[in-house]
Amino acid sequence: MQTLSGIPLNYYIYLSTALFCIGVLGVMVRRNAIIMFMCIELMLNAVNLLMVAFSRYLGDSSGQVFVFFIMAVAAAEVAVGLAILIMIYRNAKTSDTEVLNELKL
Amino acid sequence: MLTLLLILFPFLTALLLMSFSDKMARPIALGSAVIELILACFTLFTLQNGQTGLLGLNYTWSSSLGISFSIAIDGISMLMILIASLVMPLVIYFSFNKQYNNPRLLYALMMVMQSAMIGVFCAADGFLFYIFWEIALIPIYFICLMWGGENRQRITFKFFIYTLLGSLFMLLALIYVYLQSPERSFDIQVLYAAGRNMSVIEQGWVMGAFFLAFAVKMPVFPFHTWQPDTYYTAPTAGVIMLSGIMSKMATYGLIRWVLPMVPQGVFEYGHIPIILSVISIIYASCISIIQKDFKYLIAYASIAHLGLISAGILSANTQSLQGALIEMLSHAVNTVGLFVVYDIIVKRTGTSEMSRLGGLRAIDSSFAFMFFIIVLSVVALPFTSGFVGEFLLILGLFKNSPVLGSIAGLSIILGVVYMFRSFQTMMLGPTSPSMLGLPKLNIREKSTLFIVVILIIVFGVYPKPILAITENTIKTLLEGIQ
Amino acid sequence: MEQLVKLIPLFPLISFAIIGMLNRRLTKTHTAIFACTGVFLSFIDSLLVFIAQTQHHTTVEVQIYEWITVANFNSAISFLVDPLSSVFLMVITGVGFLIHVFSVGYMKDDDGFRRFFAYLNLFIFFMLILVLGNNFLVMFIGWEGVGFCSFMLIGFWYKDQKNNDAAKKAFVMNRIGDLGFLIAMCLIFTNFSTLNYSTLFAPGFITANPVSTGSLTLITICLFIGAMGKSAQIPLYTWLPDAMAGPTPVSALIHAATMVTAGIYMVARTNVLFSLTPDTMMFVAVIGIATALLGAVIGLFQNDIKKVLAYSTVSQLGLMFLALGVGAYTAAVFHVVTHAFFKALLFLGSGSVIHSMGGEQDIRKMGGLKKHMPVTYFTFLVGTLAISGIPPLAGFFSKDEILASALGQHPVWFVLGMLVSLMTAFYMFRLLYLTFHGQFRGTHEQEHHLHESPSNMTIPLIILAICAIFAGFIGFPHAVGQALGIHNWFGHFLSPVLGESEIHFSAATELTLMAITTVLIIIVILIARNIYITKKTLPTPEHEPLPAGKNIIYNKFFVDEFYNKLVTKPLDRFSEFLSSSFDKGVIEGIVNGFGKLTVRTGQTVRLLQNGNLGFYVIAIVVALISLFLIFLV
């Protein structure tokens, strides 16, 4: 088994899987929009970690390029998403997603 | 170029109409329709002089998909264009009789529709045909929706969805044939070749899919249920366009796309749609007999006639095809006549329920006379245009299948029953006092009916020029599929 | 010659157009002049053509223009004049003209005077087209055209719904026959690729084609169905008595003299085909004699003067078909000619009576009209004698020829035909006696009003009476004629088209036959005289019950009611079922069912889209995991 800087690849995979699952569970369980948001970021970063690890492992840098893309998109997403959240908070005085059901029929 | 002009001219007038005031709408619309008719006559003249070079046009639209803006005119298209451009001025002229809201929009929509329908009749590319086919549906949907009678939302919605669904099958069939063509092109000749190379079963399915689309549009039993309600609710101008021209798109489609593309499918499996069409004739005639409302009666009578046309076309011999074409013309003219009569009666009495009418002959004897000529044409009395078409159709159908031909012939009996019954109930008998003071026909009503009657008699007494328009095209077409 | 032929139908058409277009701007007198002139010119023209025919015996074919030409189907508007059509031309224009003249007087007080003459002229036009046509399709134009005019004229007094119903019934029944004709044309075309007489009936053409007897039989049966409709044969005869709702001159012209004989013309014209199919001939003869008997029986007890004549027409037409069925085409055509004269005469006479009675048609309310209307009486008497077959009036010769031919075929035909003649004699004399003899039974007012008709009505009667007396001599019986040196001119004249009669009896047989029939007829007349003059028996008044047998006959065997129950009502009910149950229920149900299905599906599926973010995420995760499991494990 090959290692990256002394740590086996498996460990990276375990870690990112764990992170991803925490993210998924967070989105699923929590109702607070900000926490859900953070969980989504967690999922993205779990993927990022995995991509960097594999990129290094395979010696192909295109994975790392994608990570940059994802980080850029995530940043944009955060900008827009937080803005929306603030607007929601101003209107609803809460960031609980359960309360936001005005568009439901 | 001429063809393109024929298609674009009404469309451009529609745009023009929108930029003028409501007051100008009528003269512009009528003028444009008349010019279109003149253009169509000029095209006919060009066609008969053999200058066909003027008539075709072919621009590549998307070379990767094999779609081109390709239009052409032959005898069959020519006749259809004549029908469309003959009916239009009559409809517009007669529509002045009534005060429509927002006339600008109405006439603009009618013009767009004419444009699209002429496009359908000229398209020499499968994809283009489909596009025009669907465009034609949009204006009539709005015409029925905005100027229609009661329950119009529900009825027009059903009409729209139904016909749209039908044409999806046509699109499927077109794409299927397209995928079979080695050149991957929607060009009509390529599609013909591809279609003919398919196995008989495939051809049968393609025919079925096409027929489904056309059967909804015509309509043919059992796909007809949208039609009576739609006709009933549509404004007179709209219903004439629907029944007079739009239903011909379907019968034209059968001749132009189904017969030459999948001839073996038609020979092998054609009896199924023919039987449906013949059922349609008898079925609609029977229902007509007990209709209480004149407009419903016309609607069902129309189904019966189109059933005969459809059965004739699928019989695919010279007599039946020629008969179908001249019957389409005759049906268009008769339709104009019948709906004009309907409008005249309703305008005066406020009802089209026949049992509440009676003795209307007292209003105006010339009205009764002209109405009767139209009735005669509908029941196919010799020397009216209806006879030439129906006789040839029955003869052609008979050559294909004597039994079906004879059954279809029953329509001449049933036709008399329902048409004469309606004529007698409404026009003859004692005049009820409330009907006595009704105004006579005004000059516009009279002249429209007069033109219709003249056309009926002229086409009936001397159909040769009409037959001559399509003669060669049909010959080529039939030679091609043998 | 060709120009002359072209002009024949043109004259009535022109006068129709003039009257139709100018309509109210014409005075009644001018209308009458135009209408009569149109037919008269046509008559002169026909006469010229006819004379030329008698001299040259050449058939003339004239093409007017190409009508429908589609591939190998070719039908021009073209005319054919041969002995057969020229005979019909003479009858149509001659009798037609006289009836026009009569109508001027008869209709003079009617509001629809112009309309009446316009249709009458149009009728003559179509009738001429019918007999002139050189192919089946042209005949069909005339065929349908006369049906249409008949419709318009039966329902002439359109304000009365009863007339309209009668008109519609006539047209629908005719159309049933027309469908037969149409199918026959289709069959002929598919078998022979032509509808032209000259090709089709050229010697040897039919036999040269490989056509089975079966399809020939089918063709002729279908043609005969057409003839049934137009010539009021069983089962399509019920329209003719109802058609008496029209003005009386119309009954005389259309429903006695001309249109109803179109069926005979058609069969005679296509005799080449019929002769090849003995089965059809048998069928024609059976239908013919059955109709003749039925008409005669019903005629025995009718009380409406026009109904009696109508059933008499049905019966006489049946006799003509019997003649056709036994192959005696000439006899049938001969009877058409003589019948046209005496039946037109009788109808016009009844018209004169009705006119004088102020519209009353019930013979129970007439009687003793002899002294008020001498001219009408004598001419009516001539007609009655002629139709009864008293020598030497016209009806005698033609009926005798039919009976002789029938005997030549089979004695049964002869006996039945004889029976018909006897009944004819009985009901005609019953009619005569009840109308003209005895005491007047109408109201006092009517009696006061009684008058002889004006001369423009009586002159046609007189001319027709003369014809009814002498017309028979043109077809003098062959055997007897030979003995006397008189030649059967009519049979000889028609022989190029209809062939020579094959049945020849010796002069003695023929004379015996004549003697027997005449004696029997005279006996029957005497019986009638005994009942209605000596015993002064009167028919039962309207509301009194009749003996069962008589009741059935008086009510025309309830055939109308039967048709109503068997055809009209079920058709209506079937249509009602199709419309309300099947169309609105089943088909509309299926179509709307699709719509409802879509809506239901949407309503169900949209529950999934509940807007709960957590639910979506769970769905995504579950879906991902299950996909993962499916594809990777």
Image (cartoon, coloured by chain):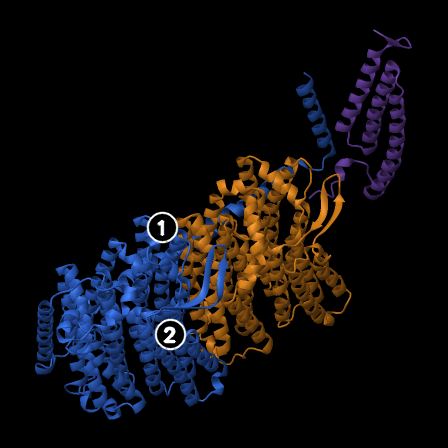
Chain colours: A purple, B orange, C blue
Any part of residue C560 in sight: yes
x, y (%) of residue B50? 66, 57
Label at residue C155 = 2
Residue positioned 58% across, 78% down in the render = B442
In the rendered image, which residue does mark 1 sit on?
A: C209
Question: Disc 1 is attached to a residue of which chain?
Answer: C
Residue positioned 69% across, 26% down in the render = C623
Question: Is residue B303 or residue C611 the one in the foreground?
Answer: B303
Q: Is residue B269 left or right of residue C477?
A: right
Rendered position, A102 above or below C528? above
x, y (%) of residue A10? 82, 11
Of helix, strand and loop, which one carries label 1? loop
Q: Is residue B226 left or right of residue C262?
A: right
Q: Quadrant of residue A62?
A: top right
Any part of residue B431 in sight: no
- Cβ atoms under marks 1 and 2 closer than 8 Å: no
First in sequence: mark 1 or mark 2?
Answer: 2
Q: Is residue B66 left or right of residue A62?
A: left
